[in-house]
């Protein structure tokens, strides 16, 4: 049965322009055309749109678009690799949350000075976190983590503990926390004698991870239905 753009749009509360934009972006396969030049969609297009909208909450717009584009280009293995990446990111976020909880439970009142061999410069730290060095300098100005300076070169140097704090900061920033809020949480991690100080933040973080995990499952189910409909 031929479907018009408005038919696809109404099912999801979208505009017809949004449907056309999705087709142009490769999220939907190319539409057939009527003798008068009007777009005609079918169940495959409807399944593609459902899959894309189901993938959005767990993967985000960029990854969801890449996944559908790969499927429509006849590259299901690439689509599955992209899905693996999102699951790996979720797993890493879980590990970081566990690290924060462990830090709260075992954070010592003070750290002994690190030896020179324990220092890491800003370039390798930024690379490890997938950030630009300018971002770490901005975080320093905002009071998140203050590195020491090499007495001979003046370069910033980070201890292993500070690198761990930066990993926590990166996850908090990804979770939507502003710089000031992230600095406050890190300060509490350093000074709190009991995990109650940041327990509400950790509970909200855990809830977001659970929501993402459920969204990834829902997206996978919808994508599977699309692959079946498209017979890919």
Image: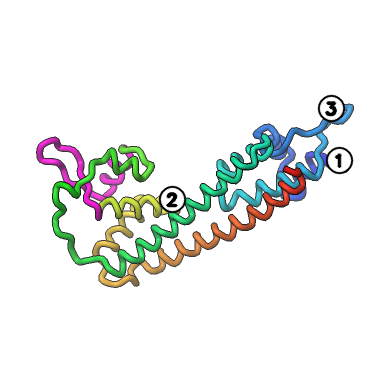
Q: Position of residue 128 (x, y in %)?
A: 34, 44
Q: Earlier in the sequence, mark 2 or mark 3?
A: 3
Q: CA distance from mark 3 to mark 1?
A: 13 Å
Q: Quadrant of residue 126?
A: top left
State the quadrant of the N terminus: top right
CB under 8 Å between callouts 3 and 1? no
Residue closest to the eye, 141 or 228: 228
Residue closest to the eye, 124 or 179: 124
Task: Identify the residue at horizontal 39%, vertical 63% (top origin).
Answer: 98
Q: Quadrant of residue 205?
A: bottom left
* Residue at which label 1 appears: 2
Q: Tell me if 161 is positioned left or right of 178 in this view.
A: left
Label 1 SS: loop
Q: Quadrant of residue 191?
A: bottom left
Circle 2 packing at 10 Å, graded few (<14), some (14-19), many (20+), is: few
Circle 1 packing at 10 Å, graded few (<14), some (14-19), many (20+), is: few
Label 3 SS: loop
Residue 206 in the magenta stretch? The answer is no
Q: Position of residue 114 (x, y in %)?
A: 16, 53
Q: Tell me if 29 is positioned left or right of 174 in this view.
A: right
Q: Which mark is residue 174?
A: 2
**Magenta stretch in the rendered image:** 134-161
């Amino acid at each position: 049965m031929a479907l018009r753009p408005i038919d696809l749009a109404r099912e999801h509360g979208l505009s017809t322009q949004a449907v056309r934009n999705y087709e142009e972006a490769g999220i939907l396969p190319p539409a057939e055309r009527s003798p008068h030049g009007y777009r005609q969609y079918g169940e495959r297009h409807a399944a593609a749109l459902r899959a894309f909208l189901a993938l959005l909450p767990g993967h985000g717009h960029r990854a969801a678009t890449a996944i559908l584009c790969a499927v429509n280009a006849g590259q299901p293995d690439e689509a599955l690799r992209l899905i693996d990446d999102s699951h790996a990111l979720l797993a890493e976020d879980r590990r970081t949350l566990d690290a924060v909880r462990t830090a709260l439970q075992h954070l010592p009142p003070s750290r002994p000075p690190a030896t020179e061999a324990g220092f890491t410069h800003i370039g390798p730290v930024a690379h490890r976190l997938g950030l630009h060095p300018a971002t770490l300098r901005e975080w320093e100005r905002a009071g998140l983590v203050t590195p020491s300076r090499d007495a001979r070169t003046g370069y910033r140097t980070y201890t292993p503990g500070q690198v761990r704090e930066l990993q926590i900061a990166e996850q908090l920033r990804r979770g939507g926390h502003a710089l000031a809020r992230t600095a406050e949480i890190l300060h509490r991690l350093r000074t709190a004698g009991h995990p109650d100080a940041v327990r509400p933040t950790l509970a909200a973080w855990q809830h977001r991870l659970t929501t993402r995990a459920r969204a990834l499952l829902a997206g996978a189910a919808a994508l599977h239905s699309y692959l079946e409909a498209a017979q890919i």
